[in-house]
Amino acid sequence: MEVISIIPARSGSKGITNKNLQEVGGKNLLSWSINASLRTQHIGRTIVSTDSIEYSNLATELGAEVPFLRPADLARDSSPDIDFVKHAILRLTEMGTRPDLIVHLRPTTPFRDPQIIDQAIGEFINSGSRYSALRSVHEMSESAYKTLEIDSEGQLMSVFTNNCDIEQSNMARQSFPTTYSPNGYVDIIATDYVEMENKIHGARVKAFVTPRVIEVDDASDLEYLNVSLEISQSPYQKVFGGVDE
């Protein structure tokens, strides 16, 4: 079974300019995902999907492959993930190779353990055809059932209910079902399923629970990750190596 990783790295970012080039622990976000992929046992090729020549050159220097550039119309803010996945499958097939599984590694989730990525791949392969995809999640600190919305009149209401009686939200956390947040740690996409259903996840997605991680959305997330590395170098060592590895 051919397993590759695809790291999406479009050049445009409205929240943080050149987000994928921002540094955590002295390494840019792109290098965190590339190194995590290269240090796995199951991933045979590490491919970066980008619309940028600059990113392409950097990714190649970091040890990844960039066998094609992504068209600009597939690298917009509004472009769904399936666009770059289908483009990658098409281009790779045209080049004479077609992966069985694609490991989707987002640069915005830098703190990963390559062994955990391998664990996810192994579990998905061993599940046979039971699942359409795998997606990583971590347990939310508060159940989503306790969250609130604000209606058009400025009143609080329980999420998804249109009910402004929010007394239930005061119940103990243990009273609600445990809910999980997708975190970009590792998602696994089956090429056959994408081509048959035109979807990347579908309705039979295997849950893969990981340690809680931070996704980079704004400058404060970068600051938090850099401060956390001052406390513990463990995430850096798992991805880049170190004396305490």
Image (cartoon, rainbow, N blue to C red):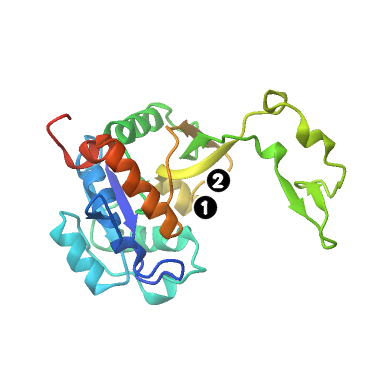
Q: Position of residue 56 (x, y in %)?
A: 22, 67
In this rendering, position of residue 206 left or right of residue 159: left
| 207 over 25 or under it: above or below | above
Q: Position of residue 237 (x, y in %)?
A: 21, 37
Residue at 76% of width from left, 29% of height from top? 171
Residue 199 visible in image: yes
Q: Position of residue 161 (x, y in %)?
A: 81, 46
Q: At label 1, which amino acid type do we have?
A: Lys
Q: At label 2, which amino acid type do we have?
A: Gly
In this rendering, position of residue 42 left or right of residue 8: left
Helix, strand or loop at label 1? It is: loop
Residue 110 visible in image: no
Q: On the image, numbered disc 2 is attached to which residue?
A: 202
Check residue 36 in the rendering and tell me which mark sits there, or answer none: none
Instruction: Name the one closer to the observer, 171 or 56.
Output: 171
Q: Alpha-carbon neighbours of circle 1 within 10 Å: few (<14), some, or many (≥20)?
A: many
Q: Alpha-carbon neighbours of circle 2 within 10 Å: few (<14), some, or many (≥20)?
A: some
Q: On the image, numbered disc 1 is attached to which residue?
A: 199
Residue at 33% of width from left, 46% of height from top? 227
Residue at 70% of width from left, 43% of height from top? 147
Q: Tell whether label 2 touches label 1 (CB within 8 Å).
A: yes
Instruction: Name the one closer to the observer, 121 or 17.
Output: 17
